[in-house]
Amino acid sequence: MEIKVCGPGCASCEKAEKVVEAAIAAKGVKADFIKVKDFQEIAKLGIFSTPAVVVNGKVKCTGRVPKQSEVEEWIG
Amino acid sequence: MKKSTHLVRISIIGLIILVIWFVVYKQLEPFSSLLTYSLFGIKRGSHLGDAVQFFAYDTPKVMMLLTLIVFVVGMIRSFFTQDRTRKYLAGKRETAGNVMAATLGIVTPFCSCSAVPLFLGFVQAGVPLGVTFSFLIAAPMVNEIALVLLYGLLGWKVAAIYLGSGLLIAIVAGWIIGRLKLENWIEDWVQELRAGEAAVDEEKLSWRDRLDRGKEAVRDIVGKVWIYVIAGIGVGALIHGYVPQDFMASIMGKQAWWSVPAAVVVGIPMYSNAAGIVPVVEALLGKGAALGTVLAFMMSVIALSLPEMIILRKVLKPPLIAVFIIVVGSGIIFTGYLFNLII
C-alpha cells in the first residue's frame, strides 16, 4: 500500500503526518509512507488545499487534518 | 426525533455555559481592582498600580473573549472549505467577484502555508487574478481574532472601522491588480499546469462534529497564541503604567504626518499574532496615539508578513510580489490618513 501525505510542512501538515503514522501503526499494515512537500507535485495530484491524504493514488481528504479513525478505515 | 432532542440538549447546555461566561466576564474589572489595590496593597494611581491592574484585567478578559470567538469561528468554518470557496468563485466576474472573494476570505479556513496550493487551485479553476488577490489579502488582514479583541477592548466602532477598511482594501487592491493585467508575472510552471482536480467525497458533518471542530480550534489556537497574548498584554501594561500621558501624541499622533507610512514600514518585518498586537494597540491609543496610525501599524503587521511573501515567491515572480506589497501598503497608508482625518 502507498500512503501520501501532502503539505508544505506547516503545523497542520505535521499533525496530519502524525495521525497517519499512528493509524498505520495501530492497524499494523505494511505501507510506503511518503511525504509530498513540493507544491508542484502536490498540484499535479489535483490537490489544491493542504494537508491532504492520498491512499493508493486515491485522494481521501483535502484541506483538513483527518481523524485517526478515518485514516484507519481508509487503509484497513 | 432522537437527533432533534440531542440538538436541543446541546443548545441548552450551550446557553447555560454562555450565561456563566457572561456573568464571570462582567466581574473581571472589579475583581482586578480588588486584586491590585486591596490584596496586593499597591497604591491607587501609582505607575505600578496602573500597570498591574491593566494586566490583571486584560489577561482574563482577552483569554475569555478569545476562547469564545475561536470556538464559534471554528464551528462556522466547518461550513466553509477552501474547495467549496474556489468552486463558488470560479464562475464569478471581476468587481462582484472581488467583493465575494474578500468576504469569503474572512470565513474560509486559511493559513499562510496553504496560500500557494490555494493560489494554484484558483488559477486552475479560472478565478481571475484580481479576484484571487482580493481573497489572499482579506484572508490574513481581516482577522476574526483581532476583530473580536478590538470589539472587546476598544468598542464596536473601532471594530467596525477595522472590518470595513480591511474589506475595502482587499476589494480595491484586488480590483487594481486585476486591471493591471499582470498574468505573465505568475511563474511559468503554474500557467503550464493542467491537472484536473482530484475527486474527493465531501465529508458529512453532524452538529456534534461541528462542536468538536470548535473545541479543536480552541485547543489548537488558544493553546498556541496564549503566550503572544500574555506578552502583548505585558507590553501594553508597561506602556499603560509608565509611558507619560500624551507621550505617543508626539510620535504617533495626528500632527506627525510621517508616522502613518513609518508605522506601515515598521510593521512589515514584524510578525505577531493578531491576538498579541491588540493589547499593545489599546495601550498606545490610551497614550494619545492616533487611531489611523495605530490601525495602519496593526494591519501592516498582520497583512504584510515576510514569511507569506517568501512562500508566495514560489508561484509569483518578484515584480508581482512588489506590486502586491505596494498596492496593499498604499491602501493601508490611505486608510491610516483617512481615519486620522475624520476621527
Image: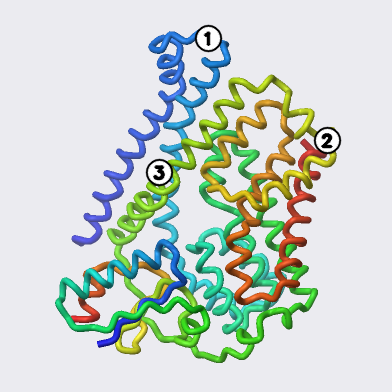
* Disc 3: which residue: B67
Dot 1 or dot 2: first in sequence order is 1
Residue A49 placement (x, y as % from top left): 47, 74
Element carrying mark 3: helix
Q: Cα distance, mark 3 to mark 1?
A: 31 Å
Residue at image mark 1:
B44
Does mark 1 fall on the same chain as mark 3? yes
Residue on which disc 2 sits? B256
Q: Position of residue B43 (x, y in %)?
A: 51, 8
Label tally: 3
Task: Give the percent coordinates (x, y) of residue B241.
Answer: 59, 21
Q: Amino acid at mark 2?
A: Ala
Circle 2 packing at 10 Å, graded few (<14), some (14-19), many (20+), is few
Answer left or right for B157 relative to A58. right
x and y percent of residue B24 in the render? 37, 29
User: From what the image shows, is residue B122 above or below residue B11?
Assistant: below
Q: Quadrant of the N terminus of chain B?
A: bottom left
Tell me if mark 3 has few (under 14), some (14-19) or many (20+) residues whose alpha carbon lies within 10 angstroms of its own.
some
Residue type for callout 1: Arg
Q: Residue at x 58, y 68 (%)?
A: B311
User: Disc 2: which chain?
Assistant: B
What residue sits 57% from the left and 79% below the top?
Answer: B120
* Disc nearer the start of the sequence (2/3): 3
Q: For residue B203, what is the image quadrant?
A: bottom left
Tags 1 and 2 in contact by the CB under 8 Å rule?
no
Identify residue type, mark 3: Thr
